[in-house]
Image (tube, helix red, strand yellow):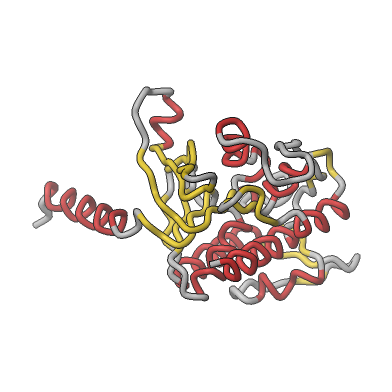
Amino acid sequence: MIDDVKVTESIVDRYFKEFSERTEVDVAIAGAGPAGLVAGRYLAEKGHEVVIFERKLSPGGGMWGGGMGYPVVVLQESSVEEIKKVGVEVEESKNGYYTADSILSVAKLLSSAIDAGVRVFNITTVEDVLYEEDKINGVVINSSAIDAAGLHVDPITIRSKATIDATGHDAEVCSVVEEKAGKLDTEQGEVMGEKSMWAEMGERTVVENTQEVFPGLWVTGMCANAVMGAPRMGPIFGGMLLSGKRAAELINSSL
C-alpha cells in the first residue's frame, strides 16, 4: 500500500538531510551549464566538496538546444578529449570540425559531475553573495519560483571557500558583486557585456578570461567573456569545456 504522507516524508527527509550537509562547502558554483559542470567535476575529483545551484529546472545551460534547436554541438579538435572523457561519441564532419549529440553531451556531463561527488540543486537562484572582510565567502540563494514571482521573501546563505560564476551571458553573480561590493579585479573593473558573434575569437578568449575577478570569486564559460567584453561564439562548445577545466585548476591550486 502506498501512503501519500510517507511519500512526502521520504522526499522532505532526504532533501533536507542532503541540503543541511552542504551549507558549508569548498566550492559553490552558480550555474550548471557545461563550464560549471566540468569545473565541478574536476574539483570534486580532487577531493573538494562542490555544490552547484541551477536556477532552471533542468541543468545544462544553452547546450541542450545545439544550434537553433538542432541537437548537435560543434567542438574544436583541442577540446574533443574533454567530451570523450565523459563517454560522448564524437564524429568528424566533412569540413574538419567535430560534432556531438547535444542531449547526450549534457546528460554525460551532468552524470559524470554527480558521479564525482558534485551535488546539484536545481530551481535555486543565486541572488547575492556572502561578502565578509573584502572577500566573497559564499552565495545567497532563494527559490527560483520566489524570485520569478517577485515575492519579498528573505534568502538563505551557503558558505564556501571559493565561488564560481558560471551563469553565462548575464554574468549574474559578477553583476551583483560590482553593484554591491566594488570594482572587479579586471582591467575594466566592471562587467563589460558580451560582444557579437565571433566564434574563433570567443573560443580563444573564453579560456584566457577564466580567472579570479574578485577575491574568492572566479568566472568560467560565457560568463568570463561577458565580464571581459569578449565575443559570443554560438553553438561551438569546446571553449566552455576547456574554461571549466581551467577554472578548476586555478581554484584547486588556491585552496
The answer to which of 167 and 75 lies nearer the viewer is 167
Q: Where is residue 31 in the image (x, y as percent from the top left)?
A: 54, 49
The answer to which of 247 and 54 lies nearer the viewer is 247
Numbered marks: total: 0
Measuring 37% from the left and 35% from the top, which residue is drawn there?
A: 155
Q: Position of residue 102 (x, y in %)?
A: 65, 58
**Is 177 placed left or right of 111 in the picture?**
right
Q: Quadrant of the rendered structure where residue 170 is? A: top right
Measuring 49% from the left and 47% from the top, which residue is drawn there?
A: 54
Q: Position of residue 173 (x, y in %)?
A: 57, 41
**Is 92 placed left or right of 63 in the picture?**
right
The answer to which of 166 and 105 lies nearer the viewer is 166
Residue 10, above or below 146: below
- Image quarter hosting the N terminus: bottom left
Measuring 52% from the left and 62% from the top, which residue is drawn there?
A: 110
Q: Position of residue 66 (x, y in %)?
A: 69, 52
Residue 190, above or below 22: above
Q: Quadrant of the rendered structure where residue 10 is? A: bottom left
Which residue sits furthest right?
95
Which residue sits furthest front?
133
